[in-house]
Amino acid sequence: MTYEAIINLQQHPIQDANYTNECKAKLDRNGALVMENFLTDSTINFLQNEAGEVRPLAYFCHQNHNAYLLDSDPEFPSEHIRNLELVSDKGCVPHDQVPEDSPLRTLYEWSDFREFLANVLEEPIFPYADTLSSININYFEKGQQLGWHYDNASFAVTLMVQAPEQGGEFEYRERVRNKEAGEQGFFDTEAVVNGSLACKTLAMGDGALVLFRGRNSLHRVAPVTSDQARILVTLNFNTEPGMMLSELARMTFFGRLE
Ligand SMILES: O=C(O)CCC(=O)C(=O)O
Ligand SMILES: [Fe+2]
């Protein structure tokens, strides 16, 4: 498939410097950028079929973690928000099982797309050096979710391939902690998790490209409640060349190291 056939370049002229600057301004303002209808309808159809075909290869994980994605801190009790265990469960088809002819690979490898991302994110971007982590097809089936957390990475790039019919909302609240300043934001983190402090929902339809800064913004994917799964592709990059995802993370999310 050609780039024009994959992406709605009229609506999202990512090779244009003015458009790129607009996107960067939106991301800086909101901590998130949703580019609806980034993928053409035919790409969405193709990717929904592809995701259905490789679905039997998905590795499903069930994980307990705290919002900080750190080992628990013995200085706090287990019910403290620092240590409170939350649940995540989803399936994942890793990079090496994404079909060779997939438009996901064409997009991921396109130099103009990478240049757009690097300019909008103001970070250099490089693919993962391991064989599993760069492109991931994620499945959230009925009852599955991603618990509240802060990302380790400074940004995430995702493509919504199939929105669920019900549930599965991406919920977030910006600037709840300040990792760089060593401020863990316990009070507000707990208030968001227990529902007493409001969060926002980031709407994303089929074909949306989403850029999100999740290091200090608390976020989750609510449990999917429809039979229709939420299928979301993460396009994963590093700010340095030659990096691999940690062995622990690869075992957790993919069930193997290579
Ligand atoms: O599924 C999503 O939309 C976001 C996933 C996410 O927050 C993550 O992988 O850290
Ligand atoms: Fe996240």
Image (cartoon, helix red, strand yellow):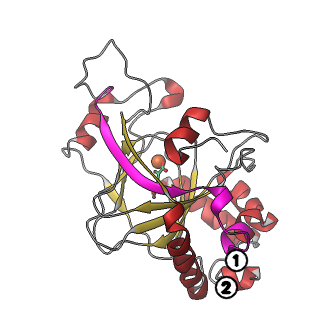
- Camera-nearest residue between 185 and 160: 160
Q: Indicate the position of residue 65 as horizontal and vertical percent values.
A: 37, 35
Task: Read off the residue under disc 1.
Answer: 13
Count of residue discs: 2
Picture quarter with the N terminus: bottom right
Residue of label 2: 10
Are the two marked residues, 1 and 2, in contact with CB atoms closer than 8 angstroms? yes
Count residues near mark 2 (Cα–Cα under 10 Å), then give few for <14, some for 14-19, many for 20+.
few
Which residue occupies 54% across, 39% down?
251
x and y percent of residue 77 in the render? 25, 18
For label 1, the crowd category at 10 Å Cα-Cα, with few meaning under 14, some 14 to 19 and many 20 or more, is some
Range covered by the magenta-colored residues: 82-105
* Residue 145 image position (x, y, % from top left): 34, 54
Quadrant of the rendered image containing residue 97: bottom right
> Which amino acid type is shown beneath numbered disc 1?
Pro
Q: Is residue 68 left or right of residue 236?
A: left
Up-down: is 103 above or below 115?
below
Q: Does the image show residue 165?
A: yes
258 above or below 37?
Answer: above
Task: Name the residue at 28% across, 59% down.
Answer: 143
Q: Quadrant of residue 235?
A: bottom right
